[in-house]
Image (tube, grey):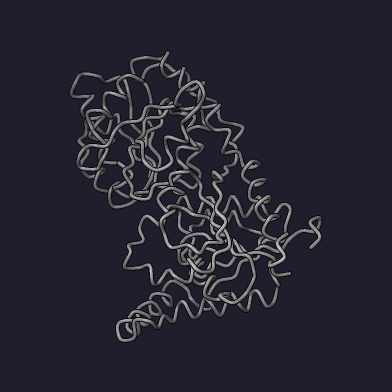
Amino acid sequence: MNRQQPRRILLTTHSLPAGGAEKFFVNLAVALAAHHDVHGFIPCLAFADRSMRSRLAGLPLTSAPHLNETAYWLFYKFRQLIRNRWPHLDIELALNQSLIRRLHHKHRFHLINTHLYLASQYACTAFAKDTLPIVESDHGHYAFLPPSEHPHAQPIFDRLTALVHPCHANASFSQNLPWHPGLIRRVIPYGSLPPPATLTPTPPAPPVHIGMVARGVEEKGWLEALAACRLLRSQNLSHFTLTLIGDGPCLQQIRASLTPSEQSWITLLGHLDQPETQLARFHIGLLPTFLPGESLPNTIIEYLNAGLPIVTTPVGGIPEMLATPAGPAGILVPLAPSGRADIPALATALHSLISEPTRRAELTSRSTLARQPFEMNRCLASYTALFDELLASPHAAS
């Protein structure tokens, strides 16, 4: 095919909540749409995060028809009843297969890019006997796939054309899965948009502001972050504040646990559509995650873009993200034997950055180097090069 012509590309994910994988899905869709004819297939679009969906305005999006939140809940219950009696019959999978085939019949896409397991499942089963290239963007989800589920994933293992890992850590833990021998694998870090031009760093004067932004799941280390800061306060280190940005049961638990005294130095802002606008207020970025399957947290990229020294854990691709020729752009805190972030070590790392402005400045200077691999132009160029390679193959659908 003529490489000078815009390609028709279908990006698909099952739903669009506020999460790191979904944020990259949106970033990539918007970046590709500047050069290609990009469509989105999001079956559960009715559940989409408002901010995520608004950023896709102008792109043609297809979802499962007539499935608002109530209708989908009823459909899901019916699906489960059928699967309990006939385990191999999945009406949702069959519906999405039919929808994506009809979409392809109408637009004749040159390539499909899937995000997360369910999207790959219905794309690979729908086009099991087709030569249409299917490229999956890996978001660490294979860490959650137990061997007992491998038979259900076999259509993906047998059909996927290429698998893009955001970091070498993901590539390592997924390499032993039963992929077909012709699978093409690449490591392409997430691309991020630059921070708003209006952001200016807060002067590094007391009090020092520690900030944490993440999904509101316990495995991101919210409780450990709070415990470490409480430990520092008990040791009479008081010239710092803590701001938590996120929402969920874990954050609600923290809010209920705060004493009146703690409310004077701990702020919970809840979920923000654009947390980047708050990062200029921080002096330190915190993410003590111990999430299984953690790959390339968007939060770390946002901290690097804001020039923040970072305190985090050596989970997934995080050590790769902080690496620079001058040394890491943050402090990596080990996990405790429990598998969670080590609270005393976390407190020690925070203490060093709170008390040593020169140390903070040193790590800030490194963040400029560490953030370069995550520029959107680099990511887009790498994805485009991979698409060119696949579409140049004599076996690619035309």
Q: Which residue is located at x 59 percent, y 77 percent?
A: 129
Quarter of the image that includes the C terminus: bottom right
The residue positioned farthest toward the front in the image shown: 181
Q: How many marks?
A: 0
Relative to 254, is 200 above or below?
above
Q: Quadrant of residue 42?
A: bottom right
Relative to 109, is 54 above or below?
above
The residue positioned farthest toward the left in the image shown: 234
| Left or right of 37 on screen, residue 169 | left
Q: Quadrant of residue 184?
A: bottom right
Residue 206: horizontal and vertical position, in percent? 37, 17
Residue 212: horizontal and vertical position, in percent? 38, 37
Q: Which residue is located at x 35 percent, y 58 percent?
A: 144
Q: Which residue is located at x 38 percent, y 77 percent?
A: 76
Q: Which residue is nearer to you in this view: 163 or 78?
A: 163
Residue 25: horizontal and vertical position, in percent? 55, 54
Relative to 161, is 354 above or below?
above
Q: Which residue is nearer to you in this view: 54 or 151?
A: 151
Q: Which residue is nearer to you in this view: 156 or 22?
A: 156
Relative to 85, is 368 above or below?
above
| Left or right of 236 on screen, residue 60 | right
Quarter of the image that includes the N terminus: bottom right
Q: Which residue is located at x 48 percent, y 53 percent?
A: 21
